[in-house]
Image (cartoon, grey):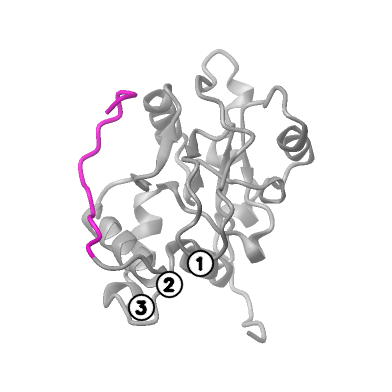
Amino acid sequence: RDVGAPFDYVQRQAETPSLRMNGVNYTRALKWARGHDVLVVEDDVIPASTLPAWIHWIENQGFTVPVLLYAWQARYFNDAEVAEVFDRGGHVPTRVVPLGAMRNWSGTIAVWWPREFHEKMIAEERFFWEAYELEALDLELRRYCERIGVVPLVMVPNLVQHRDYVRITGGGAPHKSNVFVADAMPPVDAPDAAIASDTLPDEILTPRKRGRNKE
């Protein structure tokens, strides 16, 4: 509300924090959003003041895979220039890049979900029935993407920042992003900077058949 992006739905958690309840509550939020593209954010984020303009821009790109508004380590940016800016600071050129280090990525504090993508994902049994073995949605999204052969995208600059809290589960260090820009505007007068879905490699956007690995 503070930045002009009011929310329509809140999924409260009464249970003890856990990886499973993260997955269950996130799944319930996605079930509520059936029929719509949706931005899901956790309750401990600091949004850019320009977030509403970015939501409009992202929606108009027609992305077919999730777009992360936040990634907290340089290795998650599959782009050498962005990774260097992440480490050293400085100007961050506006772009959307494929998620790097997919095998060990974690962090779902703000994700844009295209309607068809999240509807297909939560139609799977483990999500539909909120299975006992359901885990945090970052882990579930990673496994799902690896299975269908797609890669999520990451927004540069980051459009939300994690509040300076320690993680509830798994380690004590807070998640902070060095490429968060509080007042960054989406590209308007520079169409070449706007990366629409039809300019990304097919292997990022189109699910492909792939054999099971040994895991």
Q: Nearer the viewer, mark 1 or mark 3?
A: 1
Badge 1 marks a residue whose secondary structure is helix
Tag 3 secondary structure: helix
Q: Given contact means CB atoms under 8 Å apart, are the residues at marks 1 and 3 in contact? A: no
Neighbor class of circle 2 (other Cα within 10 Å; few <14, some 14-19, many 20+) is many
Q: Is residue 81 left or right of residue 29?
A: right
Q: Residues within 10 Å of mark 1 (few under 14, many from 20)?
A: some
Q: Earlier in the sequence, mark 2 or mark 3?
A: 3
Q: Which residue is mark 2?
A: 135
Tell me the magenta residue range: 1-14
Q: Which mark is residue 112?
A: none
Q: Quadrant of the C terminus?
A: bottom right
Magenta portion: prevailing SS class: loop
Query: Residue 22's x, y, as percent?
Result: 37, 63
- Give the amino acid type for the residue marked by disc 2 in the picture: Glu
| Residue 177 inside the magenta-drawn segment | no
Disc 2 secondary structure class: loop
Residue of label 3 = 126
Q: Which residue is mark 1?
A: 139
Q: Earlier in the sequence, mark 1 or mark 3?
A: 3
Horizontal and vertical percent for residue 12? Answer: 22, 55
Determine the CA span between mark 1 and mark 2.
Answer: 7 Å
